[in-house]
Image (cartoon, grey):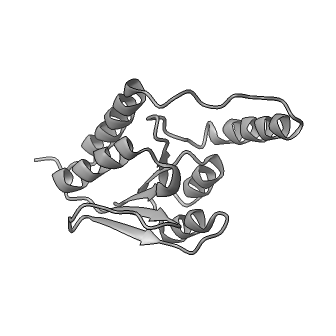
Amino acid sequence: MEIWVDADACPAVIKDILFRVADRVQLNVTLVANQLIRVPGSRFIRALQVPSGADAADAEIVARVQPGDIVVTGDIPLAALVLDKGGMPLNPRGEWYTKDTIAQQLTMRAFMDELRSSGVDTGGPGAFSQADRQRFANALDRELAKRAPKP
């Protein structure tokens, strides 16, 4: 299992959590972005820079993800593609995307895009909070604990 990160829009505090997890459980974490991302020196953490362009990082993640891999992303269409490949998408606010919920999330995203394109101010997500950070850490820890080798 590996963790892939859609790193262009991932909050720094989430990256920090992932860096600590990578070393603690000796799990490969790869940050994928179309810009240079600095990562700490660790044999478990790497950055992969892809060419600029719409969805280049998403395409790279989808090409590399394997069943059971975790993908950290707030991008709902990417999450749907990851689910199709057997991956487990987790958004930075600690919510797992699932086969049961992804269709509704895609529909809501399209509806909100339509509202915005017609000039309606839809606001957007609230500020990233300490509670969001904690929910993410807890969700990731619970999943990793399920996969830990039993003594």
117 lies left or right of 41: right
Task: Indicate the quadrant where residue 56 lies.
Answer: bottom right
Compared to residue 123, the image places residue 10 above or below, namely below
Compared to residue 147, the image places residue 49 above or below, namely below
Residue at image location 38% in from the left, 30% down from the top: 135
- Tell me where residue 64 appears, x and y as whole percent: 48, 70
Of residues 81 and 110, the one nearer the viewer is 110
Residue furthest to the top in view is: 131
Residue at image location 54% in from the left, 71% down from the top: 63
118 lies left or right of 44: right
Residue at image location 30% in from the left, 61% down from the top: 39
Of residues 142 and 34, the one nearer the viewer is 34
Residue at image location 47% in from the left, 48% down from the top: 10
Compared to residue 5, the image places residue 65 above or below, namely below
- Tell me where residue 61 appears, x and y as whole percent: 51, 65
Residue furthest to the left in view is: 151
- Tell me where residue 116 appears, x and y as whole percent: 81, 37
- Tell me where residue 67 appears, x and y as whole percent: 45, 60
Task: Indicate the quadrant where residue 111 lies.
Answer: top right
Task: Indicate the quadrant where residue 14 lies.
Answer: top left
